[in-house]
Amino acid sequence: MTLHTIEWHTIPVNRTEEREWPRMNANYKMFVGGNWVEADGGKRFDSDNPFTGRSWASIPHGTTADVDAAVAAAKSALTTGDWPAMSASQRGALLRKLGDLIVEEADRLAEIETRDNGKLLNETSLQIRYTAQFYYYYGGMADKIEGAVIPVEKPNIHNYTRLEPIGVVAVITPWNSPLLIAAGKIGAALAAGCTVVVKPSEFTSASTLALAELFERAGFPKGVLNVISGFGHEIGDYFVGHPDVGCVAFTGGTSTGQRINEVAAKTFKKTVLELGGKSPNIIFEDADLDNAILGAVSGIFAASGQSCVAGSRLLVQRSIHDQVVERLVDFAKSIKLGDPMAPDTHMGPIATRPQYERVLSYFDIARSDGAECVVGGTPLDGDGQFVQPTIYTGVKNDMRIAQEEIFGPLLSIIPFDDDDHALSIANDTLYGLASGVWTQNMQRAFRFSHALQAGQVWVNMYRAASYMTPLGGYKRSGLGSENGKDHVYDYLHKKAVWMNYGEDAPQPFVQKL
Ligand code: NDP
């Protein structure tokens, strides 16, 4: 029985020893203009480990003055000094060097992320190694960004396009996979010749602050990459609205994305937004059920459901509904919750206290919606931020648990009768990030792949990703897409140049058409 998940499983992990939680206690600094700095005013805040419930790191409490300093450093590095003087090939070489350093430091970075967000070390170790691939890929693209010569119909004109960096890119990331989510944005922006200011989530700033060290070691010129830390509700609007920011690349919740777009619109900034989802994972009666069950589990219980692409609505053909429910309930009961550092843990804690409380609130919502809970559905005893794998049946697609992104391990199972019924339920959502289809019927697989309104369709697999493949959302799941070759063009202006090598006198009052 094989589950086709992410290719990361082919990358070896060198973790040999168990580590003890209290070992680290780190005082991080922000990285601005190539200097390691405290926040303006010197304030700091604690970063808590969601497994132990204790603070494990201290983070500078950045202010709008720090935003100004970081954006000024990035603006200066864009037009003066070594970065704009470098050839595209040299920029690419730096990105590839960075990739090598990430591989070298992957164990340390993975441990930092697990401490901050409680994600399994098994997964963060693979994720961090995989982030290196983004920098190799975009490093390879840096010197393949080409304009065009356009054979305009006018005589004696040489007309061509240049692709120029869009400016300072503001990268804003969420807490669930900070370095993986930042990698495509930073890699593509730097390949394009831009400079970057990153603001990670207040809950998981440490890994991005630690990553900055590797930019320094790789030899990037000062100010090309800056990392500030702080609270989104305090500095977010100021950062996004900053007149010297040229583009905002964001992953996070849909309401934050909406806010960012409103603020960015006032200064006509481009935005690339990766937002939330309520993705349908559809099992047909002809599916390989062993794999489909594993795919359903990976869709909702991996990362404790804290995944933007979570397959949180499981649509099951009525003829196999009871069998699927029974098998999923058995599976859910076997899931081991615990220490995310331990190699045999399946699900770690919920990453943040507010998110934990939000997830728990859906137990009551599901009850008042009238859904039937077949496993889980109650808070666990103890202090930890653990939520047990929870499955609801009898779910109607208009219930809140089927329409709202929960970002936790709560699965809604919805029966369907035939293909048309499945498709109408699947697309009946405000979101459109991902989807899964489990069938052995090729015609159906293609039909659904084309008809599903979602940025990703996985057939007989779930939760796969690649730096080469675009990731973007339909409807309220986002704007634009990231990863893949095209993402570099999000960070480029297209300029047209007209060179006249004729000798005709210009017409002063009539446009040259
Ligand atoms: P949030 O939207 O709350 O926060 C995301 C980032 O935005 C954080 O760095 C946050 O800072 C910052 N932020 C908050 N307010 C503002 C503001 N006004 N202006 C600028 N930045 C701001 O998301 P979460 O961190 O809670 O992450 C969970 C959400 O992310 C889920 O909804 C999930 O679906 C989505 N997500 C989407 C993915 C995708 O690829 N589509 C991937 C992963 C997650 P701070 O933390 O300091 O508030």
Image (tube, helix red, strand yellow):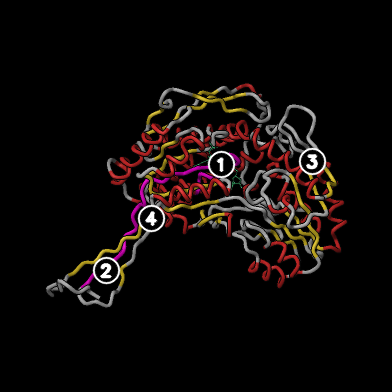
Give the numbered dot on residue 323: none
Q: Are marks 1 and 2 in contact (CB under 8 Å)?
A: no
N-terminal-most mark, 3 or 1: 1
Task: Name the amino acid type tagged 1.
Answer: Pro
Identify which residue is drawn at 59% across, 24% down.
56
Q: Which residues are magenta?
A: 157-184
| Real-space CA distance between mark 1 and mark 2, rounded to the nearest whole angstrom | 43 Å
Sooner in the amino-acid sequence: mark 3 or mark 4: 3
If you read the primary sequence from the N terminus, does the residue marked by circle 3 or circle 2 appear first? 2
- The Cα–Cα distance between marks 3 and 1, rounded to whole angstroms, is 26 Å
> Which label sits on residue 159?
2
Circle 3: residue type: Ile
Q: Which residue is mark 3?
A: 335
- Left or right of 172: which side holds 348? right
Label 2 Cα neighbours within 10 Å, binned few <14 / some 14-19 / many ≥20: some
Quadrant (top left/top right/bottom left/bottom right) for the C terminus: bottom left
Q: Categorize mark 3 by other alpha carbons within 10 Å: few (<14), some (14-19), many (20+).
A: some
| Disc on res. 492 | 4
Residue 384 located within the stretch drawn in magenta: no
Q: As shown in the figure, which amino acid type bears the numbered disc 2?
A: Asn
Confirm or deny contact between disc 3 and disc 2 (CB under 8 A).
Answer: no
- Counting from the top left corner in percent of width and height, residue 347 is at 73, 39
Q: Which residue is mark 1?
A: 174
The span from disc 4 to disc 1 (Cα, nearest Å) is 24 Å
Residue at 49% x, 26% y is 28
Can residue 266 be seen here?
Answer: yes
